[in-house]
């Protein structure tokens, strides 16, 4: 590995000034589960690592009237133990439980997963489904970017030199809503998504009609996708398999996967539809408060 | 399960704690990666980014100029080998090919092929320097597939390779042109045309299997010191210290006795840690610098530049009568050897019909060079490939004829006296008993319900080799015995060898202290491989124990002042006339007063075994929408001859099955168009994890091998052979598609399922 500087700021102001001083040659370090491996392989050679784990704003995990705030450095293991997230943002919990093993989950952050901007990132489809918004701080102040517009290509995103992802915030979940994430992997654990689907649904009081739905897709395009039309056409429709199949078809139309060692293009298109239906079924069951058990990988 | 009358044993068949257990579970065991020597330098390899290219030039000047760099070596530093063919313990090797595999000479033949090496003050400088070595390549067209490589117009890898015909008429009289087909085997028995004419049903299919890796956790490593007196010491992870010594000496063209190999603990090998890759390079760097040099591979290096097992293309044909008796079999088997000749296709030819009495057979095999790493042994090399083909065809025959697949196997099973298609006649073997064990098992007898679920069975065969082993044992004054052996311990053999010594001496396993030592400290011992150690090194240990018995008898006779013939060694006691008696411990305390130390020694060399058989039963569930397979239940029955330490026998059976499941479902070398393996990580090379396999249920069958004093058969390899076929059969019974390509990964299986519903 090459030589580099290491900084550990304790405030956001200090972090931003360090980022500015290194003038685009620094990379923020949260859990490091992607970054350190990439540096060992020589894929990234930053001149400095800015460790953001000591910054208060990046470690927030709390709800207020605006909804849920997840600091960019909060590790998966904290998220899966947070009671409100477990009740209302279950897709996020589903994602955080299957990112690596226990050791990885103790370090890896959702913010880091998003900033790494891998097409197959397991948390991003859930963030999209739950309407997450990125809060980004930089030399010019703070700006907000919806998660579905954050990634711009494999390993690429909207962050400009000197900018830092501070948190992802989510609007409060309406009543009668539920969400779920699952992925297809050839193994049952410790694997990378061949296709990943996150969905959040809101039902009416009867629990039979869908008021709104959002679907996020992973590993089927150069960036994670928001299947906007697939979600939109469910609005006002009965929550049943016929409608789920329509959504699946709509989702299949927007994907542009590649053939690689993880699966063929045809396979990924097919499985996109299969998973959209399964995930919607599960999200609806959760919205209805029905018992729903899910064994990852199966 | 005891399937034969057993002699009563006191130690054999028990489950003592392994002698190296405490070091292993506390992390104190020393592996190659732990080596730290004063003044040690760290090395890094320069590897080819191309699958096939001519080396135009190598410029090491920039690397050498980097501060902290102490030496750079290329193939120019390796001694010339000429056309020598050398016997290297596990078969003869063409030294020109072997040396070019260590450091490429004029061509690189696969991505990851080593081209140069650097030694520097630390690993970071070494890696940086490796990037500064400028290699100019003339890129050539790679050939990645065995059938493509056999075509007349294929790119040729080695211009010195001509087809060697073994039992077959030369394919082409023109031996002037180089070819990728290094060997052509042919075995024949009876009259195949007559056999197929007698058949009521003939099934024939083609099969493909992907190249797969052994997947040991510990990467290859070597630390070398070439001393100023010309003596070379190598600390390394190896399956065979003596074969590593010999290979290193031959590659460096130094006398074999000037090399000492110190085997460190080993984190898995499965056949892949027999060939040497790093030791000669580390030695050359050490000679240039006068300091010890350590080389370690990365995971990608291990995948790209060590010896996986071949991918294959096979055509298999089997004829049977209506009542389910095999009349004839024919097989055409082509293996990709990788960059240089030497795939186990010959073994595959011997194994393909070995489970069955095939009256008329013909087997043809081809060893073919392609632009992939030079292949090497992997647990029952060649047998898993052919088991996938034959055992799925047998299942299809049973389905078409409405026969129970186990009854079919019992009817056709190889038995004592059956002659294999390649010639040898089986001695007493346990194929039938393993089939019976599965037939009578709770698993096979229980119903399997539920949609998209299916059950499959398959059998498999693998040889057990004997080869050479040495053991010495010294008696301590406190009545314990120190056991010195040369067999590197991969699967708990310190304990299984110690138990045989203990049984023979009539002492406790805990009273034997086994140590694996370097090549200067014990007699020649062949590799830990071929399912041989518990068998052959066991025989040597029994010999050593008998040697000790003889000496103890003499000491007792001396103390009692009687003729040694009047003293009997019986179950750890020495019995003399008139009720005189010593326990082993009592007499051990007297040895310094009766002539000094007692050292027993034993060797074994020529014994060969009848071989090992196993039959497996698996239940699967297929997700018909995604093609993903879950293993619900798995039972293995295997003939162990006599299980010395049943826990280790079960461990071998379970480990083999898990590797077979990985091979069946997901493992493969996935290459892009340029011949680059795109999944050279454990993230994307999908070994099964503990979430993917159920507890493997084991049934040890014991049909003692008459050639071993305690009836031992090797158990390490055959358990990997049946799983791909058993799982393929189960998938068929679950969703109605016959898989004839490995791996049966979700995309591959789903495409077959979708095709079936289209048809």
Image (tube, grey):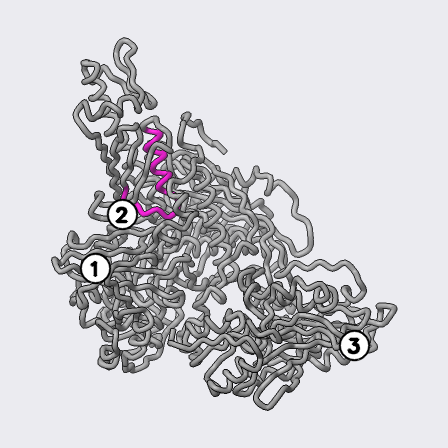
Say left or right for A215 vs B86. right
Residue B756 spot, x, y in % from top left: 62, 65
Q: Which residue is mark 1?
A: B225
Q: Nearer the viewer, residue B56 or B446?
A: B56
Q: Nearer the viewer, residue B666 or B203?
A: B666
CA neighbours of label 3 inside 10 A, class few (<14), some (14 to 19), many (20+): some
Asked if both marks, 1 and 3, belong to the same chain, the answer given is no
The answer for which chain carries disc 2 is: B
Q: Is residue B364 visible?
A: yes
Secondary structure under tag 1 reads strand
Q: Which residues are magenta?
A: B485-504
Relative depth, front residue between A120 and B351? A120
| Residue B496 part of the magenta-drawn span | yes
Image spot of residue B264 (x, y percent): 31, 52
Q: Give the letter of the chain under mark 1.
A: B
| Disc sitting over residue B526 in the figure | 2
Residue B348 x/y as whole percent: 38, 54
Of all residues, the one furthest to the top in this rendering is B578
Label 3 – label 2 distance at C-alpha: 70 Å
Q: Quadrant of residue B70?
A: bottom left
Q: Are marks 2 and 1 on the same chain?
A: yes
Residue positioned 53% across, 52% down in the render: B726
Quadrant of the rendered image containing residue B293: bottom left
Relative to B538, residue A135 above or below? below
The residue beneath circle 3 is A212
Name the mark nearer the viewer: 1 or 3. Answer: 1
N-terminal of the pair, mark 2 or mark 1, is: 1
Which of the chains bears the disc numbered 3? A
């Amino acid at each position: 590995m090459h030589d580099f500087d290491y900084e550990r700021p304790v405030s956001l102001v200090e972090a931003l000034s360090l980022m500015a001083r290194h003038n685009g040659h620094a990379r923020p370090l949260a859990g490091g589960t992607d970054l350190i491996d990439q540096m060992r392989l020589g894929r990234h050679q930053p001149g400095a690592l800015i460790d953001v784990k000591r910054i208060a704003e990046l470690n927030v995990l709390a709800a207020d009237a605006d909804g849920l705030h997840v600091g960019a450095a909060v590790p998966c293991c904290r998220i899966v133990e947070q009671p409100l997230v477990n009740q209302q943002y279950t897709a996020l919990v589903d994602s955080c439980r299957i990112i690596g093993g226990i050791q990885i989950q103790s370090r890896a952050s959702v913010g880091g997963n998003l900033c790494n901007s891998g097409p197959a990132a397991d948390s991003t489809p859930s963030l999209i489904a739950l309407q997450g918004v990125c809060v980004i701080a930089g030399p010019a102040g703070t700006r907000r970017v919806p998660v579905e517009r954050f990634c711009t290509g494999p390993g690429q995103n909207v962050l400009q030199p000197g900018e830092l992802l501070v948190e992802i915030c989510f609007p409060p979940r309406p009543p009668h809503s539920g969400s779920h994430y699952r992925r297809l992997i050839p193994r049952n654990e410790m694997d990378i998504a061949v296709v990943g689907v996150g969905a959040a649904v809101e039902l009416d009081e009867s629990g039979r009609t869908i008021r709104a739905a959002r679907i996020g897709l992973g590993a089927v395009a150069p960036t994670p996708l928001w299947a906007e039309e697939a979600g939109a056409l469910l609005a006002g429709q009965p929550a049943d398999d016929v409608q789920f199949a329509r959504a699946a078809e709509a989702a299949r139309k927007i994907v542009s996967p590649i053939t690689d060692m993880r699966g063929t293009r045809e396979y990924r298109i097919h499985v996109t539809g299969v998973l959209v239906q399964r995930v919607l079924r599960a999200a609806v069951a959760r919205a209805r408060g029905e018992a729903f058990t899910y064994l990852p990988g199966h | 399960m005891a399937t034969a009358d057993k002699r009563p044993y006191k130690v054999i068949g028990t489950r003592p704690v392994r002698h190296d257990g405490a070091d292993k579970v506390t992390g104190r065991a020393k592996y190659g990666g732990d080596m730290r020597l004063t003044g040690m330098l760290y090395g890094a390899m320069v590897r080819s980014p191309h699958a096939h290219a001519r080396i135009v030039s190598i410029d090491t000047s920039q690397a050498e100029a980097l501060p902290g760099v102490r030496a750079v070596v290329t193939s120019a530093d390796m001694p010339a080998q000429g056309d020598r063919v050398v016997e290297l313990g596990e078969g003869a090797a063409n030294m020109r090919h072997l040396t070019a595999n260590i450091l490429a000479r004029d061509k690189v033949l696969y991505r990851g092929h080593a081209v140069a090496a650097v030694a520097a003050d630390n690993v970071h400088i070494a890696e940086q320097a490796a990037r500064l070595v400028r290699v100019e390549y003339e890129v050539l067209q790679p050939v990645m597939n065995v059938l493509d490589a056999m075509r007349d117009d294929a790119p040729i890898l080695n211009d010195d390779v001509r087809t060697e015909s073994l039992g077959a008429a030369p394919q082409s009289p023109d031996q002037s042109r180089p070819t990728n087909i290094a060997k052509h085997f042919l075995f024949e028995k009876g009259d195949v045309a007559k056999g197929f004419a007698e058949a009521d049903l003939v099934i024939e299919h083609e099969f493909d299997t992907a190249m797969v890796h052994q997947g040991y956790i510990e990467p290859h490593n070597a630390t070398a010191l070439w001393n100023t007196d010309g003596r070379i010491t190598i600390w390394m992870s190896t399956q065979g210290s003596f074969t590593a010594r010999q290979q290193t000496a031959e590659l460096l063209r130094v006398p074999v006795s000037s090399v000492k190999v110190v085997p460190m603990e080993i984190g898995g090998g499965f056949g892949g840690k027999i060939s040497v890759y790093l030791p000669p390079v580390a030695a050359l760097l050490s000679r240039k610098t006068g300091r010890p040099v350590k080389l370690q591979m990365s995971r990608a290096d291990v995948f790209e530049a060590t010896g996986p097992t071949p991918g294959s293309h096979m055509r298999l044909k089997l004829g049977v009568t209506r009542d389910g008796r095999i009349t004839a079999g024919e097989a055409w088997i082509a293996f990709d050897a990788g960059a240089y000749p030497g795939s186990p296709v010959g073994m595959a030819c011997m194994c393909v019909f070995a489970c069955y009495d095939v009256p008329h057979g013909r087997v043809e095999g081809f060893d073919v060079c392609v632009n992939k790493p030079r292949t090497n042994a992997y647990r029952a090399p060649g047998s898993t490939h052919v088991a996938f083909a034959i055992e799925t065809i047998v299942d299809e025959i049973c389905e078409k004829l409405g026969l129970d697949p186990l009854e079919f196997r019992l009817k056709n099973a190889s038995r004592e006296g059956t002659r294999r298609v390649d010639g040898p006649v089986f001695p007493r073997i346990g194929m039938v008993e393993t089939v019976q064990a599965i037939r009578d098992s709770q698993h096979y007898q229980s119903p399997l319900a539920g949609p998209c679920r299916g059950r499959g069975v398959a059998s498999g065969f693998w040889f057990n080799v004997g080869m050479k082993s040495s053991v010495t044992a010294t008696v301590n004054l406190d009545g314990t015995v120190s056991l010195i052996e040369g067999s590197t311990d991969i699967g708990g053999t310190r304990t299984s060898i110690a138990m045989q010594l203990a049984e023979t001496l009539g002492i406790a396993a805990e009273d034997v202290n086994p140590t694996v030592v370097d090549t200067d400290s014990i007699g020649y011992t062949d590799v830990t491989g071929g399912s041989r150690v518990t068998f052959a090194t066991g025989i040597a240990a029994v010999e050593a124990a008998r040697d000790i018995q003889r000496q103890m008898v003499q000491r007792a006779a001396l103390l009692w002042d009687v003729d040694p013939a009047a003293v009997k060694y019986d179950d750890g006691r020495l019995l003399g006339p008139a009720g005189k008696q010593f326990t082993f411990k009592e007499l051990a305390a007297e040895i310094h007063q009766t002539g000094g130390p007692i050292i027993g020694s034993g060797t074994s060399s020529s014994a060969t075994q009848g071989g090992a058989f196993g039959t497996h039963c698996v239940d699967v569930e297929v997700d018909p929408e995604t093609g993903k397979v879950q293993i619900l239940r798995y039972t293995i029955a295997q003939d162990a001859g006599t299980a010395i330490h049943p826990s280790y026998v079960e461990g071998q059976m379970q480990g083999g099955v898990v590797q077979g499941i990985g091979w069946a479902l997901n493992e493969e070398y996935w290459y892009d168009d340029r011949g680059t393996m795109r999944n050279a990580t454990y993230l994307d090379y999908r070994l099964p994890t503990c979430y993917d396999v159920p507890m493997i249920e084991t049934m040890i069958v014991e049909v003692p091998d008459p050639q071993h004093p305690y009836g031992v058969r090797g158990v390490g390899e055959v358990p990997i052979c049946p799983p791909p076929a058993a799982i393929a059969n189960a998938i068929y019974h679950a969703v109605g598609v016959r898989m004839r390509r490995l791996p049966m990964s979700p995309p591959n299986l789903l495409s077959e399922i979708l095709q079936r519903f289209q048809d």
